[in-house]
Image: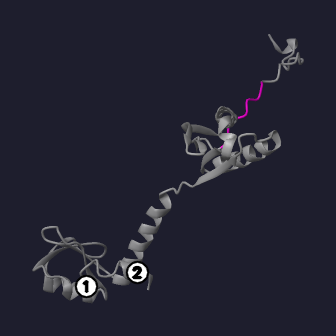
Amino acid sequence: MKNDSLKGQHRINEQIRAKEVRIVGDEVEPKVYPIGQALRLAEEHEADLVEISPNAQPPVCRIIDYSKFLYQLKKRQKEQKAKQVKVNVKEIRFGPQTDDHDYNFKLKHAKGFLEDGDKVKAYVFFKGRSILFKEQGEVLLLRFANDLEDYAKVDQMPVLEGKRMTIQLSPKKVAAPKKNVAPKPAEDAPKAVSAETEE
């Protein structure tokens, strides 16, 4: 059963050790009841007495079907998890002498990742003697960040780590950049209001 991880976290019915409990919930007058009366009330409702705040004085209980209670808890946890946005980091690899065609292809991918809300980690990998071109690698990464300025903000400027020079970008909050549409020049259109209407 999926709810097993939550089972055992709450005392129910006869497991509740307090002499009296405060009952909250629907169809029950919220007040403090002796444990015997609280259990009888739960029985009358064909439900369970579930201890939801064991550390309160007296402990707080609800009269609810325990499996329904677990289901609601599970659902709430799921909703909270869904609200925690997972941020993926997509890596894009360049060589120190990447040609324009390859660069533009990778730039297009990066835009897609950023529009989906992913972070982008771009790096230039230097093999052997190509480390001599590290300035070229830095220029490439800065050009990459500049070409993506409508989509991303730079988290980390180019850093050389071993044989890799890395730059990290995060998506901007706005989903898509606003296109700057130049206002059309007003044409000398005939005015709608004719002179005769004016008195």
Tell me residue 27's x, y (percent): 30, 76
> Label 1 crowding class (10 Å Cα cut-off): few <14, some 14-19, many 20+?
some
- Cα separation, mark 2 vs mark 1, equals 22 Å
Task: Tell me the quarter of the image containing the C terminus.
Answer: top right
Q: Position of residue 162 (x, y in %)?
A: 56, 45
Q: Secondary structure at mark 1?
A: helix
**41 in relation to 57, above or below:** below
Residue 116 seen from this side? no
The numbered dot on residue 42 is: 1
Res 111 seen here: yes
Q: Please name the residue shown 73% across and 43% down the image.
A: 107
Residue beneath the point at 67% across and 49% down: 92
Residue 73, percent across and down? 38, 72
Quick check: is 193 in the magenta stretch? no
> Magenta region, mostly helix, strand or loop?
loop
Taking 135 as reference, is 6 left or right? left
Q: Is residue 77 above or below residue 139?
A: below
Using the rendered view, name the quadrant where residue 183 is placed. top right
Q: Which residues are magenta?
A: 176-182
Q: Label 2, on which residue?
A: 3
On the rendered structure, is 183 left or right of 170? right
Q: Amino acid at mark 2?
A: Asn
In this picture, is 46 found above or below 171? below
